Amino acid sequence: MSVITLRAVEKADLEILYAHQADLAALRMAAVSGRDHPAFMAHWAKLLGDPSLMKQAILSDGALVGHLAAWEEGGRLLLGYWVGRDHWGRGIASRAVAAFLSQVARRPIHAHVAQHNAGSIRVLERCGFRRVDQGIVAVAGVDVAEWVYVLDAAGARTGSD
């Protein structure tokens, strides 16, 4: 099993993170719209300059494989994460989310996930989130069914349950 560590996202990480989000299969699975290179870089320049945004790079055996973030929106704390498709199915996201949650004291934390994204649903449930709502989100003009999950408790599971 690989060693998962988290660290601050650095400007040097952005090309790899851009490649992850430019993967069309991953975009479909996550049910999000991608950004072109200039828009992605401008977005991340803003994120890197925002000290209120909690953001971490995910490393697997020292290699950058994704990122996590928590931010406030509409009075709720939201969690988001992305692991490059080449690294799916190895438990990396579950262990990274569990490690990240141990650094975030605020609860509750909410997460939105496309209903067809079974892998991400497993990640959230392994980390102690429970499904509380459903909805529809428009992605590139297409309606996508989503679940809303919440983590109420102060702690998180290990991500390997």
Image: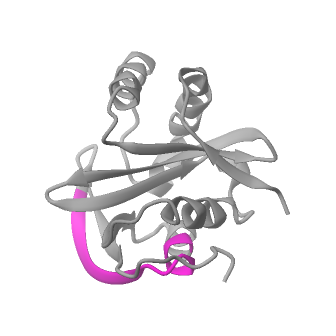
- Say if the magenta span includes residue 22: no
State the image coordinates of residue 66 (x, y, percent, origin top left).
Answer: 60, 44
- Say if the magenta span includes residue 129: yes
Identify the residue at horizontal 28%, vertical 43% (top origin).
140
Q: Which quarter of the figure is the C terminus placed in?
A: bottom right
Q: Which quarter of the figure is the N terminus placed in?
A: bottom right
State the image coordinates of residue 89 (x, y, percent, origin top left).
Answer: 71, 63
Residue with the most extreme right position: 1
Quarter of image, res 33: top left
Quarter of image, res 47: top left
Residue with the most extreme left position: 74
Of 138 and 130, the residue lying toward us:
130
Of 106 and 121, the residue lying toward us:
106
* Left or right of residue 74, residue 128 in this image: right
Identify the residue at horizontal 53%, vertical 66% (top origin).
102
Q: Which residues are magenta?
A: 123-137
* Left or right of residue 77, residue 55 in this image: right
State the image coordinates of residue 25 (x, y, percent, origin top left).
Answer: 55, 47
Identify the residue at horizontal 33%, vertical 66% (top origin).
106
* Left or right of residue 146, residue 159 in this image: right
